[in-house]
Image: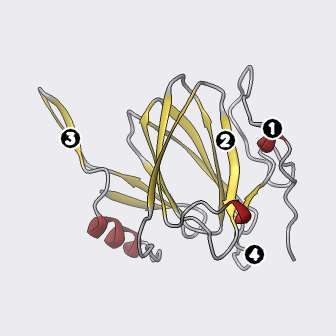
């Protein structure tokens, strides 16, 4: 597995080693020892554990996010795509961070097989770029309804540069999420 840092400290792009032959291909989707060692090589503190794996299926144009949970239920997420493609976005909400309010995005798809490690303290969202897109993500804390929060997906202060679509499909909750208020 190849681990790469991003302009935002704490985020990491992971490229698994894929073995191809006449039968198809094989890869490790997760290896705890390699995951921890890879993050530590980037001076990123790895999570102690994951508690749950989630899978979502979305049609093209579905935008989910930008979601996060408050302390002590912040969720670290290891995001990958099983089928299709997404434009995956993480927004730094760590008030003490030099990159507070900044965002990072990349395309995750079933061809490049890249993964994105998003530690707690970030809002996360994605836009499905193809029909029948399946996203898998491991999380470090269980869902907690009382600590669930969102930031408006097209907030002008954050200014995520989402790919243009003829139509975006969002839940009412995501459409009505509050704007980002930068804490000083």
> Looking at this view, is 38 or 179 the one in front?
179
3 relative to 48, above or below: above
105 relative to 48, above or below: above
109 relative to 118, above or below: above
Image coords of residue 32 (percent x, y): 30, 66
Image coords of residue 21 (percent x, y): 13, 32
Residue at image mark 2: 64
Residue at image mark 1: 172
Q: CA distance from mark 4 to mark 1?
A: 28 Å
On-image quarter of the N terminus: bottom left
> Looking at this view, is 27 or 74 the one in front?
74
> Which quarter of the picture shows residue 11?
bottom right
- Left or right side of 173 for 12: left
> Looking at this view, is 97 or 54 the one in front?
54
| SS type, badge 2 | strand
The disc, 2 or 1, on the residue closer to the chain's N-terminal end is 2
161 relative to 6, above or below: above
- Left or right side of 150 for 43: left
Image coords of residue 88 (percent x, y): 58, 45
Q: CA distance from mark 2 to mark 1?
A: 11 Å
Residue at 49 percent across and 66 percent down: it is: 140
> Which quarter of the picture shows residue 72?
bottom right
Residue at 80 percent across and 48 percent down: it is: 159
Residue at image mark 3: 26
| SS type, badge 1 | helix
The disc, 3 or 4, on the residue closer to the chain's N-terminal end is 3
Q: CA distance from mark 2 to mark 3?
A: 29 Å
Q: Nearer the viewer, mark 3 or mark 1?
A: 1
Residue at image mark 4: 95
| SS type, badge 4 | loop
| SS type, badge 3 | strand
């Amino acid at each position: 597995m190849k681990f790469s840092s991003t302009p935002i400290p704490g985020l990491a792009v992971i490229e698994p080693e894929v073995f191809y032959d006449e039968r198809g291909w094989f890869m490790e989707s997760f290896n705890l020892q390699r995951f921890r060692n890879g993050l530590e090589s980037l001076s990123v503190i790895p999570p102690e554990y994951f508690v749950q794996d989630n899978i979502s299926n979305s049609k093209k144009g579905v935008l989910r996010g930008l979601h996060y949970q408050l302390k002590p239920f912040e969720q670290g997420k290891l995001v990958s795509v099983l089928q299709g493609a997404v434009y995956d976005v993480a927004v730094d909400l760590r008030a003490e961070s030099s990159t507070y309010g900044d965002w990072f995005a990349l395309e995750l798809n079933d061809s490049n097989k890249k993964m994105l490690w998003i530690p707690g303290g970030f809002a996360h969202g994605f836009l499905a770029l193809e029909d029948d897109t399946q996203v898998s993500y491991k999380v470090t804390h269980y869902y907690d309804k009382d600590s669930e929060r969102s930031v408006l997906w097209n907030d002008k202060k954050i200014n995520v540069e989402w790919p243009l679509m003829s139509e975006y499909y969002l839940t009412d909750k995501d459409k009505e999420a509050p704007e980002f208020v930068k804490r000083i």
